[in-house]
Structures are given as C-alpha cells and as structure tokens.
Image (tube, coloured by chain):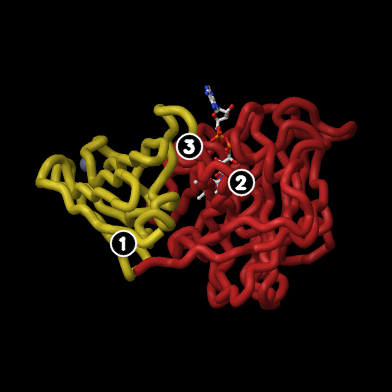
Chain colours: A yellow, B red
C-alpha cells in the first residue's frame, strides 16, 4: 500500500475493521445508494495507503466508507458525508 | 474489541524462487484458519515506527504453525526484509486469521477454478493443499501465470499427479522448450478451456496484482460468467 494510487479490495479491510467491529466484515453485504449495485464488502475497491483507506463502489466509485487511523483512534466515515465515528483502540 | 496481535517466531525460511520465500512461523495459540485467509504482519523498529502488511496463508491449518509466501518487491519497505532480512528465530507480530470472503471450504464439491498471477498463487495453494488433505471430490483447475519457468512457486505442491487437480502454467515472457502455448498474457482462449469444465454456479477465485485481477475479471465477465461466481483478491 505504498503509493496513493494503489487499488486494493475490501479483503484488505478485514484487519483494520477487526479493530472496531466484532463481526467478520468482508462478507457484509452492501448496496450502493448511487447505482444500486450490491455485493460483499470484500469487493469494494479500496484506495490507500494506510493510515487513510477509502472504499468505493466497484460500479460507480461512490464512497462506501473511509477509515483513517490517527494515533490511538480510528475514524470511520460511512458513505459520502454523514459525519464520522471515532473509535478509541487499545494499542 | 478486535483480533489481538500475537507474537510469531520465524522457524524456517525456504526459497521458492530467486526473490520469493516461504516463511514458516509459529504463532502460539493460533486458532486455525480457512484456506484463502490472510494475516496482517506488523514490524516495529527500535524507534517505535511500525509497518503493517497483509500476507496470505499458504498452507491449511496445522496447530501453531503458519506458512506465508512472500515476494520481495523492488524498493518495497517490508517484503525484502521478510524475504531476506528477518533472522530465523526472530519475532514479528501477526493478526488473524482475516477475511471470510476469499475462502474455499472442503464442503464445496462443485468444480472450482483458481486463477493466479505471480504471488497470487499463495492463497490458492492453501486451497489446493486443503483440497488434497480433505480428499475433496470436487475437481480444482488452477491457471497460474508467471513470467518464466524460474518464477514458478510451490512445484511440489502443485504437481503430484492428483487426478482431481489440473494445473496449467501460463508463461508471459519465456516458456520452457516444447511448450505449445506461446508466451503471453492470459487470454480468453486460456479461460475458455478452463471455464468449459465448470458448472454455472462453480466458484472462480482470482488472485494476484491488481492489474492481473482486473484483466481476468473482465475476460470472465466478457465470456458471460456470472459475476456473482467470481471472487477476487487484489494484492496491490
Ligand atoms: C489481502 C492481501 C494479501 C496479500 N498476500 C500477499 C502474499 O501472500 N504474498 C506477497 O508477497 N504479497 C501479498 N500481498 C501484498 C503485500 O501486502 C505487500 O503489499 C507487498 O509485500 C509489498 O509490500 P512492501 O512493504 O515490500 O512494499 P511497499 O513499501 O508497500 O511498496 C509497494 C510498491 O510501491 C513502490 N514504492 C515504495 N515506496 C515508493 C516510493 N517512495 N516511491 C515510489 N514507489 C514506491 C515499491 O517499489 C513497490 O512497488 C497481499 C496484499 C493483500 C492486500
Ligand atoms: Zn455504485
């Protein structure tokens, strides 16, 4: 995940999201509010690198979520702009 | 919350190619994993700087032992250290197993197609090895794209006369003498033959560099494969 144009997929979110979710995230089903495409979180297109990951719809590039790590915190934004959740993580 | 980081010790390192290594680690109290899953590996420098990268598990679950396959990437920060720097006996931290989507389960009896580009063969080899260990009845077809014969990983695991495992190696730059297929990137023709042996709902697993995965995904969809049957994992 070195350069800013790196494109991965939702599989790489399994570790980072496991820090704040108690369920396995990659099999979670997601429906795009923009183009109505649906599928598992694993298939979202993810742009990095850490500490800022953006997951987008594979069909229309609409933002599904953003995950930003900042010290002992993880910021999670769902969708394009509906406010952010900040989770404290234990080191 | 979360999956804890645990210390893992490097037990053994084996060369796969000039630049790829198998790393066998022992991770105390490892909970086991499914073929296709990965771990995150965390390295911490003396000054506290940390780097985290994902690596697929190359072997089925085996107690506290886990096996990774790492390709040294030119100019990469972590992979050259894992392939040639980390001393045997030293520790890293691992978090896992991770990912329940890109997995193959022994209960699956439909024929499956595995398509690997370069280091993408790692999780697919775990599937092949698990398939054999479980004496699974569903045939596996593996299409494996590499540059040249020197770049083939896991020869022992992939070629042992198992009648339910069909392995086809596709060379992109240089094929061994006597090869019928001319060197070149994967084409529809390569996929047609393999997909002809699948059922409509058979799963296809595609793994490798992002460009490779994208190309194969597009070829499969152009050939009319139902996207729902295609599972992909991009290595970047
Ligand atoms: C789910 C998952 C599973 C994976 N499984 C495996 C596996 O089984 N085996 C495996 O080998 N890999 C695997 N990978 C890839 C792995 O996680 C790493 O991305 C890979 O090892 C490269 O890491 P690195 O630190 O060596 O390179 P990085 O430092 O991250 O660099 C990556 C690329 O960027 C370039 N680069 C770095 N710094 C710069 C710079 N300053 N300017 C310009 N370019 C630069 C490098 O040359 C390199 O090409 C997997 C990835 C994912 C997401
Ligand atoms: Zn969309």
The Cα atoms of the two marked residues, 3 and 1, are separated by 21 Å
Taking B234 as reference, is B18 left or right?
Answer: right
Disc sitting over residue B120 in the figure: 2
Disc sitting over residue A1 in the figure: 3
When the figure is inspected, residue B116 is found, relative to residue A39, above or below; the finding is: above
Mark 2 — on which chain does it sit?
B
Q: Is mark 2 within 8 Å of ligand 1?
A: yes
> Could you say whether the residue bearing mark 1 is in a helix, strand or loop?
loop
Q: Nearer the viewer, residue B198 or A83?
A: A83
Q: Residue at x 54, y 42 (%)?
A: B47
Residue B146: x and y, percent? 71, 37
> Could you say whether the residue bearing mark 2 is in a helix, strand or loop?
helix
Q: Residue at x 68, y 45 (%)?
A: B82
Q: Is residue B139 visible?
A: yes
Dot placed on the residue nearer the N-terminal end, 3 or 1: 3
Taking A45 as reference, is B60 left or right?
Answer: right
Q: Nearer the viewer, residue B63 or B163?
A: B63
Ligand 1 positioned in quadrant: top right
Report which residue position mark 1 lands on.
A20
Farthest front residue in view = B47
């Amino acid at each position: 995940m070195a350069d800013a144009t790196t494109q991965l997929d939702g599989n790489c979110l399994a570790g980072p999201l496991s820090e704040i979710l108690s369920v396995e995230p990659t099999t979670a089903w997601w429906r795009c509010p923009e183009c109505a495409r649906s599928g598992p979180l694993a298939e979202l297109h993810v742009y990095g690198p850490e500490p800022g990951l953006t997951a987008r719809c594979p069909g229309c590039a609409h933002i599904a979520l953003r995950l930003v790590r900042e010290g002992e915190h993880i910021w999670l934004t769902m969708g394009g702009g509906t406010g952010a959740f900040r989770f404290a993580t234990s080191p | 919350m979360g999956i804890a980081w645990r210390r893992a010790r490097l037990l053994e390192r084996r060369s796969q190619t000039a630049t790829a290594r198998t790393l066998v680690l022992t991770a105390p109290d490892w909970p086991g994993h499914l073929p296709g899953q990965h771990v995150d590996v965390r390295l911490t420098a003396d000054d506290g700087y940390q780097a985290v990268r994902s690596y697929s598990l190359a072997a089925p679950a085996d107690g506290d032992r886990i096996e990774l396959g790492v390709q040294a990437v030119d100019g990469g920060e972590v992979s050259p250290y894992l392939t040639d720097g980390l001393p045997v006996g030293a520790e890293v931290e691992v978090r896992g197993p991770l990912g329940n989507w890109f997995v193959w389960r022994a209960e699956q009896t439909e024929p499956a197609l595995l398509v690997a580009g370069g280091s993408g063969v790692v999780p697919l080899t775990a599937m092949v090895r698990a398939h054999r260990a479980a004496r699974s009845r569903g045939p596996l077809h593996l299409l494996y794209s590499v540059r040249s014969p020197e770049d083939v990983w896991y020869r022992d695991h992939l070629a042992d006369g198992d009648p339910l495992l069909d392995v086809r190696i596709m060379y992109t730059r240089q094929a061994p003498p006597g090869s019928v297929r001319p060197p070149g990137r994967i084409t529809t023709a390569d996929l047609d033959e393999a997909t002809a042996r699948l059922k409509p709902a058979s799963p296809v697993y595609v793994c490798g560099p992002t460009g490779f995965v994208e190309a194969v995904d597009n070829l499969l969809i152009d050939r009319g494969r139902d996207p729902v049957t295609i599972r992909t994992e991009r290595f970047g």
